[in-house]
Image (spheres, rainbow, N blue to C red):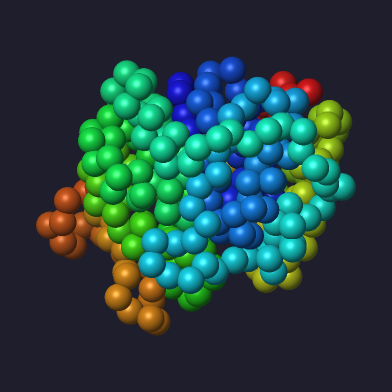
Amino acid sequence: MKIIIDTDPGQDDAAAIMLALGSPEIEVLGITTVAGNVPLALTTRNALIVCELSGRTDVKVFAGADQPLRRALVTAEHAHGKTGLDGPELFEPAVPLQDGHAVDFIIEALMNEASGTVSLCPIGPLTNIALALQKEPAVAGRIKQIVLMGGGYFEQGNITPSAEFNIYVDPEAAAIVFACGAPLVMLPLDVTHKVLTTKLRVERIRAVDNRAARALTQMLLFYERFNEEKYGTDGGPLHDPTTIAWLLRPDLFKGRMCNVEIETKSNLTRGATVVDWWGVTDRGKNALVLRDVNADGFFDLLTERLANLE
Ligand code: RIB
Ligand code: CA
């Protein structure tokens, strides 16, 4: 499977990148960064650091959009720390950043690879994906699928009562992506709130005891502090790697095809993903919306694949 991961690392983004790099079924054509959890300079530095921690200095990383299409950037240092990757001792990455803009890399990859063979896995705000669709509309018909972490329906929101962070930051970009016609697979809060980094699960990750797993353990111990306080749970939701896990083991998940529209007008509900789960409209079903997951199976997969890294 050929994929491009579009990301705003982010401790949970790091887990997604490591899961992909530890899975031989997946060829990561490149990693593109976007402003989100923290500003672009930091998400880009963090993506390079995660590749190095994974022993994969060969992976190409491209920097992308430093702000949403039309709105001011909203960041989430409260959850991820001021570096965006708080937890482990960080370092200046030796891996060089690729020249060229992430959006041009996405377009080039989609135009050069055989049509219908490249999956996009956006796990941050959808700015880069929307810009690629605007700059080269022909890519829409060449995307195999867009497997994204974002939105929420039964779980509503996390950054506002009605919106999930990735969609909230750039709702206009999300509206473009959800209307582009490419096959969409949506991993919303309804799924990710069911994959909690409990003490037992983090201990199993720690026991993998390689460089990547040791760093990820420290990231999760930092990241879950905020989430345990907010949700009163044992562990926090490990959002982003659910996208990669779906690619590898779709049988771990359950959901249905639904119409999904994005609220871009209202201040109160900006960024809400309006999912017609009960089919009460005749709007086209543009996304596979996942709702349930075998959480133990998910963490077994993540832990097993981490062991493949250096
Ligand atoms: O709402 C969760 C999403 O926002 C995750 O992708 C997390 O990394 C943040 O970007
Ligand atoms: Ca993210």
Check the picture and name the quadrant holding the C terminus.
top right
Residue at screen point 38% across, 73% down: 270
Give left or right: position of 44 versus 64: right
Left or right of residue 260, residue 31 in this image:
right
Q: What residue is at 53 percent from the left and 22 percent from the top?
A: 26
Hey, which residue is sitting farthest left in the picture? Answer: 282
Residue 28 appearing in the image: yes
For residue 163, what is the image quadrant?
bottom left
Quadrant location of residue 39? Answer: bottom right
Above or below: residue 11 compared with residue 234? above
Q: Residue 243: horizontal and vertical position, in percent?
A: 50, 40
Q: Residue at position x 70%, y 25% from top?
A: 56
Q: Residue at x 33, y 79 (%)?
A: 266
Q: Nearer the viewer, residue 256 or 122?
A: 122
Is 74 on the left or on the right of 45, as rendered? left
Which residue is situated farthest in the bottom direction here? 268
Image coords of residue 85 (percent x, y): 73, 52
Foreground residue, 145 or 227? 145
Camera sees residue 205: no
Q: Is residue 23 left or right of residue 80?
A: left
